[in-house]
Image (tube, rainbow, N blue to C red):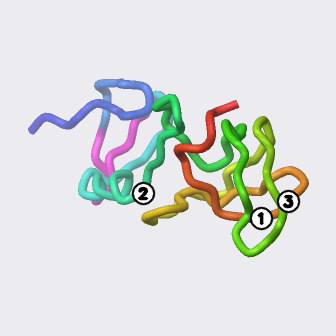
Amino acid sequence: MSLPPCPQCNSEYVYQDQDNLVCPECAYEWNPADTSADEDEPTAKDANGTQLNAGDKVTLIKDLKVKGSSQVLKIGTKAMIRRIVDGKDHELDCRVDGAGEMMVTAKFVKKA
């Protein structure tokens, strides 16, 4: 019975401990049955096709009108992604400098 290599350090010296697999070199533990946990997270790509993650800092690439307000977010405004949600229009839950918390469409930002 061959065990898969460690996903962290690619070590081949993996052993099984009950349901989990353990790497003795980096001490990483994982359950091989839980492979779908990483695939269920929503993903988003910026205007250049770069993968965006929670915690990334982004910059607006065009002026955006704020719905329900007369405020306009100018090109070059910086924002930090708090989380990525699976939605039709607005995928990024961001904290925008000077405007507060709001949802932004991923195609209007680029990774800073």
Marking on residue 41 = 2
Determine which quarter of the picture holds residue 104: bottom right
Q: In the displayed structure, does residue 66 sit left or right of residue 107?
A: right
Residue 80 drawn at (x, y percent):
74, 48
Q: How many marks?
A: 3
Q: What amino acid is found at the position of numbered circle 2 in the picture?
A: Glu
- How much space separates mark 3 and mark 2, taking CA atoms? 27 Å
Q: Tell me, for residue 99, which label it has, or none.
A: 3
Q: Is residue 20 left or right of residue 95?
A: left
Residue at position x 9%, y 39% in the image: 1
Picture layout, residue 110 above or below residue 84: above
Q: Residue furthest left?
A: 1
Crowdedness near tag 1: few (<14), some (14–19) or many (≥20) residues, C-alpha within 10 Å:
some
- Write the start and end of the magenta stretch as one range: 15-24
Give above or below for 12 relative to 6: above
Which residue lies most toward the right here? 98
Q: Is residue 94 above or below residue 110?
A: below
- Residue that label 1 marks: 101
Q: Magenta stretch containing residue 22, yes or no?
A: yes
Image-based side of 42 in relation to 97, left or right: left
Q: Earlier in the sequence, mark 1 or mark 2?
A: 2
- Please give the name of the residue rendered at 29% of the width and 52% of the height, measured from the top-left corner: 35
Does residue 70 show up magenta in the picture? no
Earlier residue among tags 3 and 2: 2
Q: Residue at x 35, y 33 (%)?
A: 6
Report, in whole angstroms, how far the alpha carbon at label 3 lies from the one at label 1.
7 Å
Labels 3 & 1 near each other (Cβ < 8 A): no
Mark seen at residue 109? none
Q: Secondary structure at mark 1?
A: strand
Q: Residue at x 80, y 42 (%)?
A: 77
